[in-house]
Image (spheres, helix red, strand yellow):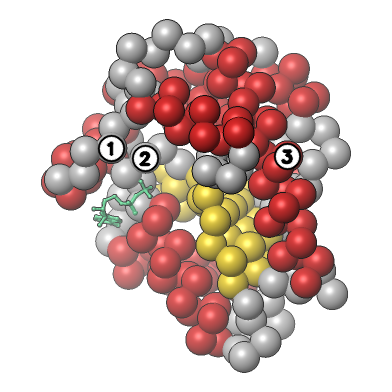
Amino acid sequence: MRGKFIVFEGIDGCGKSTQINILSRFLFDLSKKNHVLITREPTLQSEQGIQLNKLLKNQTGLAESEVFLNLFVGDRRHHIENLINPTLEYGGIVICDRYILSTLAYQQAQGQNLNNMIAKHRGLPVPDLTLLFDISPEHAMQRIDDSGRDQKTLFEKIEFLKKVRLNYLELSERLPEHKVRIIDASRSIEEIHKKILEVIKKERLFEDI
Ligand code: ADP
């Protein structure tokens, strides 16, 4: 039986990694049948992914949005072929930090045409569930500052992130096949985990939750 594909989306600092860790552990401990793969995009496994990681650290922001778009799509195809699909075919659970919606929300904010981007992703696997962590950019950036993490990418500017946030919310309605459920990410770590389990239960993703 094909496994389950769960995607976490939202701006940096919204709490994705924190909840991915908690949920993965929960699912792994839930049943001996569960094999959980935690992965993220962009990867460092493809030429495109390696290039993207360099560009994202480049604060000058000189790269064209079209360059980003093509690199993201190329890296994603590689990720799907080499890691996501084989794991799902094996019956595993794939938990992915960022996927198609990230490209649509960020590169739309960079000026790319949404329909064109959707067309470039046609035929790729869609998640069984997308958890969209919604939070104000101010709050998310405060969390990053508090953590002492110095990983700001060129996308982390408040005005830009406000557009990304709105794009994400619009995409959740526009692309029902991605099964986006919005999570209030301003709550506590425990409350958010509880909410995620409620959503998973409601969506009947697993027999034993
Ligand atoms: P992301 O993966 O989305 O960038 P992280 O999970 O790395 O976000 O969280 C960013 C920072 O905020 C970390 O220092 C983390 O410990 C903290 N954090 C995560 N979730 C919460 C929460 N619900 N409330 C307060 N702080 C949080």
Q: Residue at x 63, y 63 (%)?
A: 94
In the displayed structure, 69 sits above or below 53; it is above
Mark 2 or mark 3, earlier in chain: 2
User: Is label 1 in contact with label 2 (beta carbons under 8 Å)?
Assistant: yes
Q: Quadrant of the N terminus?
A: bottom right
Distance of mark 2 from mark 3, alpha carbons?
Answer: 23 Å
Q: Which element is circle 2 on? A: loop
Q: Residue at x 52, y 43 (%)?
A: 44
For mark 1, does the 10 Å Cα neighbourhood hold few (<14), some (14 to 19), or many (20 or more) residues? few
Mark 3 or mark 1, earlier in chain: 3
Q: Is residue 130 visible?
A: yes
Q: Report the mark closest to the observer, 1 or 2.
A: 1
Amino acid type, label 1: Gln
Distance of mark 3 from mark 1, alpha carbons?
Answer: 26 Å
The residue pinned by badge 3 equals 77
The residue pinned by badge 1 equals 151
Does the Cβ of the disc 2 residue fall within 8 Å of ligand 1? yes
For this orientation, the residue located farthest to the front is 47
Please count the marks in the image.
3
Q: Where is residue 63 shown, x and y percent of the image? A: 48, 12
Q: Where is residue 75 shown, x and y percent of the image? A: 64, 36
For mark 3, does the 10 Å Cα neighbourhood hold few (<14), some (14 to 19), or many (20 or more) residues? some
Q: Where is residue 25 shown, x and y percent of the image? A: 46, 77
Amino acid type, label 2: Asp
Q: Where is residue 12 shown, x and y percent of the image? A: 37, 40
Mark 1 or mark 2, earlier in chain: 2
Q: Report the mark closest to the observer, 2 or 3.
A: 3
In this view, the residue in front, 169 or 145, is: 145
Q: Residue at x 76, y 61 (%)?
A: 86
Distance of mark 1 from mark 2, alpha carbons?
Answer: 9 Å
Q: Which element is circle 1 on? A: loop
Mark on residue 12?
Answer: 2
